[in-house]
Image (cartoon, grey):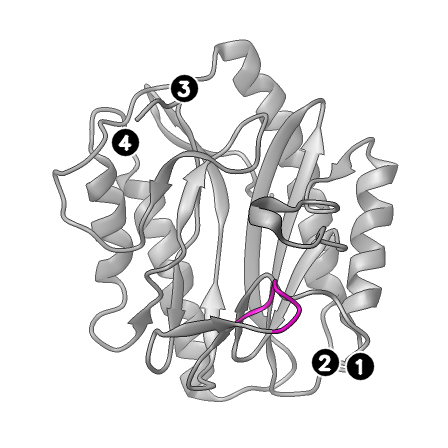
Amino acid sequence: MSVELKSARELDAMRAAGRVNAEVRALLMDAVRPGVTGLELDRLAKDAIAERGGEPTFVGYAPFGKPPYPGAICYSVNEELVHGIPNDRALQDGDIVSVDLGVTYGGWVSDAAFTMAVGETSAEARALLEATRDALWAGIEAAQAGCRLGDVSAAIGAKAQGRYGIIKGYGGHGVGRQMHMEPHVPNFGAAGKGLKLMPGLVLALEPMFCLGDPATEETDDEWTVVMSDGSLSAHFEETVAITEHGPEVLTRIS
């Protein structure tokens, strides 16, 4: 496996891309409420990215013969896990919504996501969100120079605590001038195994947990991934640089 290590100058450029992502994501979080639609959130993201001199990474993305992705965000509600296409459905009180945002700035990509409750939701849903968010930060803490990729995967998976399904067909990835690069980062694994983490490696870590069975399927739009049993799912993501001084979250919202 060949992985790309970024120079100090390249990391500075990725920090700039990460700041734009964080600013736009903060706007999206503030805009999530009952009655808002995915198309409205997508327009907000496109406008905010353009105002900051960036480009929406996801627009036109077409891997593996898929149709070009139309949105700046992925907008996934309730049983929709990831890659949902923004639509005109209004969010309802009690929904949970995942918003994934890719920003290209100065030629460098930043990738991050959040899932949040819309209005008042169930205690079960809130606990799922908390566990998935905690898994992200456990993975980040484990992403220390000299450690192994399996340490990150194991730290993420441990937060499922036997209570949640871990979606195994999707995971984190390297990121740089391209959105998806080596290595793949599973959300489960064995500590002490796998690639040694070196300063300059940049990863998008993204745990995905669900309340039911972790089996997924793709809808007819060829993008939206849903839980086969209709259970709620959650997804969090940050772009993280491995440095000599510890992991640095490039997309952190200040």
The prevailing secondary structure element of the residues shown in magenta is: loop
- Looking at the image, tell me whether mark 4 or mark 1 is earlier in sequence order: 1
Q: Are marks 4 and 1 in contact (CB under 8 Å)?
A: no
Which residue appears at 72% of the width and 58% of the height?
A: 28
Q: Are marks 3 and 1 in contact (CB under 8 Å)?
A: no
Secondary structure state at the residue bearing disc 4: loop
Whole-angstrom CA distance, mark 3 to mark 4, is 11 Å
State the quadrant of the N terminus: top left
Residue at image mark 4: 144
Mark number displayed over residue 91: 2
The magenta-colored residue range is 220-225
At label 4, which amino acid type do we have? Gln
Which residue appears at 14% of the width and 38% of the height?
A: 193
Position of residue 240 measured from the top left corner of the image (x, y, whole percent): 45, 36
At label 1, which amino acid type do we have? Gly
**Quarter of the image where one finds residue 54:** top right
- Looking at the image, tell me whether mark 2 or mark 4 is earlier in sequence order: 2
Residue at image mark 1: 35
